Image (tube, helix red, strand yellow):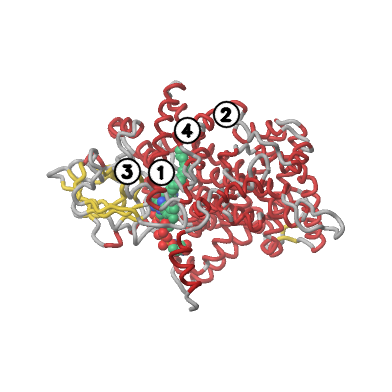
Amino acid sequence: MSKNLSIVNKDLKEERDKINFNVEEFTNWFYGGAEKVKEKKYIENYFLSDKDLNLELDTSYLSYKDKYEEAVRRSIVVYKKLYKLHNEMGGTHEDFVKIMENLRFTMGAINPEGNPFVLHFSMFALTIMNMTNDEQKAEWLPRIFNCNILGTYAQTELGHGTYIQRLETTATYDPKTKEFTLNSPTLTSYKWWPGNLGHTVDHAIVMAQLYSQGKCHGIQPFIVQLRDSETHKPLPGIDIGDIGNKVGFQTVNNGFLGFKNVKVPYKNMLMKNSKLLEDGTFIKPKNAKLNYGTMVIIRVHMIIDAACRIAKATTIALRYSLVRRQSPINPNEIEPKIIEHITQQNKIFPGIAKAVVFKCMADYLTKLHLSITQEGNTGNLARMPELHALSCCLKAVCTNEDAKTVEVCRLSCGGHGFLRSAGLDDVYRNSTAAQTYEGENTVMLLQAARFLIKSFNEARNGGSLTEGVKYLFDFIGRNGKREIFDNSINGILRAIQAAAAGRTYIAWKHIEDDKRHNSIEVATNLAGVHLTKAAELHGYVCLLQVGIEEIEKIIRNVSPALGLVFKNILELFAVDLILNKIGDVIQHVDISNEDIEKLEKQMETLFKFFRTSAIGVVDGFDFSDPIIDSTLGSYDGNVYENLINAARKSPLNQEDVNRTFHLYIKPFMKSNL
Ligand SMILES: CCCCCCCC/C=C\CCCCCC(=O)SCCNC(=O)CCNC(=O)[C@H](O)C(C)(C)COP(=O)(O)OP(=O)(O)OC[C@H]1O[C@@H](n2cnc3c(N)ncnc32)[C@H](O)[C@@H]1OP(=O)(O)O
Ligand SMILES: Cc1cc2nc3c(=O)[nH]c(=O)nc-3n(C[C@H](O)[C@H](O)[C@H](O)COP(=O)(O)OP(=O)(O)OC[C@H]3O[C@@H](n4cnc5c(N)ncnc54)[C@H](O)[C@@H]3O)c2cc1C
């Protein structure tokens, strides 16, 4: 994808002239190699250059219904092309994955308020791939990949989203007819929220309580047809629709769904984990939580999504800050680029570092997920709880940071950041949605804390710990003494580890004390605030630890100039982290006021060094103009021209006088009240 061909703003050009490392080398790292970058650019261009998409149309001005219809139309243009390209590339599964990975960015530009088919290619397809037996795979996968059927993942209900054990939808098996009957016995049992459900898909994975031989066997997944394949009318007994306007995700078509005596054949219960014999005998899975597997995969994917949203927001904020001039620092000088105000650097530079460290974490977690899944396929489920805890913890920490950072980027653009055309509002809406979907973040932190408390008990009893929580041994070994701070990257890591372990200890002690008067469950609830803080700190430990390990490897493999930039980024991430968590650190680490002042000074030095590299790093994220879709963040930096051009496209500006003048305003003005 070519950069914008207009003349680049001279302030921005001057910045780029000073970059002292190879931006392309950084881009190659970010996307996993030069070949992948080439593929990404080709795929972006292949889709975005299609005139049928009509990307000139600013869909933000359309009505709710028109937005949805346009999003469906555009998606179909894309998916038709996807299949054409897939065939041209050779038609293998790997080719499909390559295109889908690159569509992650492209789809955001095509449907900024969400993709009405996203669940089909993610949660629906993944559930069928991972939770079915061989016959079911053979029956469903070809129809899914040919899009002969379209599906979603319908789990959440009006009454229950978090506590899925209490979902109310029932699936009652009758061995005589070899059918399940699905019912929504109450209003609160209506499915509520599933993406693409309202009017787009005709099938869903439905999570329902299985009843057989008079007993409830817990929630199980079923493939259910919802709409007629020809007319798209809801099938008998299905009550379905769109849930209405939301904070964001306007074109994702989140829906509701109720069942009244809907018959589903025996073969439609997903049988890889739990099994139901034809006579109705239920066979338990090796681990009941295997049915939660799709959520784990998506939580792992959400880390890279968070990294990319931060990368996009910081690209916009930084480019704008390099061309916007405001408020002289010395009264007699010209107004500087706003980036010269150190508070502006403090708003943007740590965000850039987070995008890089989150990307390292996403790579690490993807590999870990793969290896633990492979172990699982051979029947070894020992590391499932570790993966669950880690994915919950990082999903929460990374999406919380993501929403915070994107909002800070918006604020860093002053008033113009509040314009839709600045491109930050959809990023923010998507970030904040991610704090809730796939597990509300507090709940995710509490799941991670459960693992921490277990590990803490294990450590106290001299048991063995998984690699990521071994720092709990150090805390116990110090026997109440505080960790002594040293101002190195590893010193900062040890300080954050000490804070995380200390906070885990406080939560543990809280539970132990309360257990004397309460049940363990009540005691755990009363320690909830400490538990979430411990889990959050544990998430930062993981990020910094993985950041250090991965960036050390990267530095060994890139040019010295780029290596220095990575070193700078890692230090920025670490020092920003410890300064933000200083309250927790002071509680558990022997750190002096002088040490803290030194860290603050170090931050200023890091900013100074990063000042010249920052533009190279955000350019290296390589968001083309159609993808960044921002008046403030375009490659050429011509923000004022972009802003006035965007304003002129407002529907209100298509005529000199709006009809409300003659209808209301003029009569009002002439009425003398
Ligand atoms: C190609 C892919 C592209 C990807 C791009 C995707 C982008 C998508 C974008 C937009 C689409 C939006 C999609 C949104 C979809 C959704 O939101 S779907 C609905 C998601 N819903 C949730 O996440 C619900 C959250 N709740 C839960 O996950 C669970 O209820 C719970 C984990 C909080 C609790 O489960 P429960 O059964 O009640 O467990 P407990 O009795 O509390 O016991 C906890 C023990 O269970 C262990 N455990 C729990 N889950 C797992 C797991 N998955 N694996 C392993 N172990 C698990 C946990 O460790 C506890 O063990 P101990 O008892 O030993 O401590
Ligand atoms: C944009 C979007 C897309 C979605 N897409 C889908 C989809 O495709 N398919 C689907 O099935 N679902 C989907 N969902 C639903 C989503 O997964 C749930 O909303 C989410 O899991 C939270 O559940 P809830 O709404 O029941 O919140 P609740 O659990 O009711 O949470 C409300 C409050 O209670 C607190 N709380 C709840 N339980 C606990 C606890 N144990 N300890 C402490 N605090 C607690 C929470 O922290 C929160 O503050 C989507 C949601 C959104 C917003």
First in sequence, mark 2 or 3: give its number: 2
- How far is mark 2 from mark 3, CA to CA? 32 Å
Residues packed near mark 4 inside 10 Å, few (<14), some (14 to 19) or many (20 plus): few
Q: Amino acid at mark 2?
A: Lys
Residue 101, image x, y percentages = 50, 35
Which residue was labeled with disc 4? 51
* Circle 1 SS class: helix
Q: CA distance from mark 4 to mark 1?
A: 14 Å
Q: Position of residue 396 (x, y in %)?
A: 53, 53
Q: Earlier in the sequence, mark 3 or mark 4?
A: 4
Picture quarter with the N terminus: top right
Label 1, label 3: how many angstroms apart (C-alpha)?
16 Å
Check disc 2: other Cα within 10 Å, few if <14, some if 14-19, many if 20+. some
Q: Which residue is mark 3?
A: 201
Q: Earlier in the sequence, mark 2 or mark 1?
A: 2
Q: Earlier in the sequence, mark 4 or mark 2?
A: 2
Badge nearest the viewer, 2 or 1: 1
- Residue 544 is situated, as x and y percent measured from the top left of the image, at 65, 48
Q: Amino acid at mark 1?
A: Glu
Q: What residue does disc 1 label?
A: 70
- Determine which residue is flagged by label 2: 36
Query: Is 516 on the left-hand or right-hand side of 623?
Result: left
Residue 459 image-quadrant placement: bottom right
Frontmost of labels 1 and 3 is 1
Report the Cα–Cα distance between label 4 and label 2: 25 Å
Q: Is residue 596 above or below residue 198?
A: below
Q: Earlier in the sequence, mark 1 or mark 3?
A: 1
Q: Secondary structure at mark 4?
A: helix
- Which residue occupies 70% across, 34% down? 23
Q: Is residue 34 above or below residue 578?
A: above
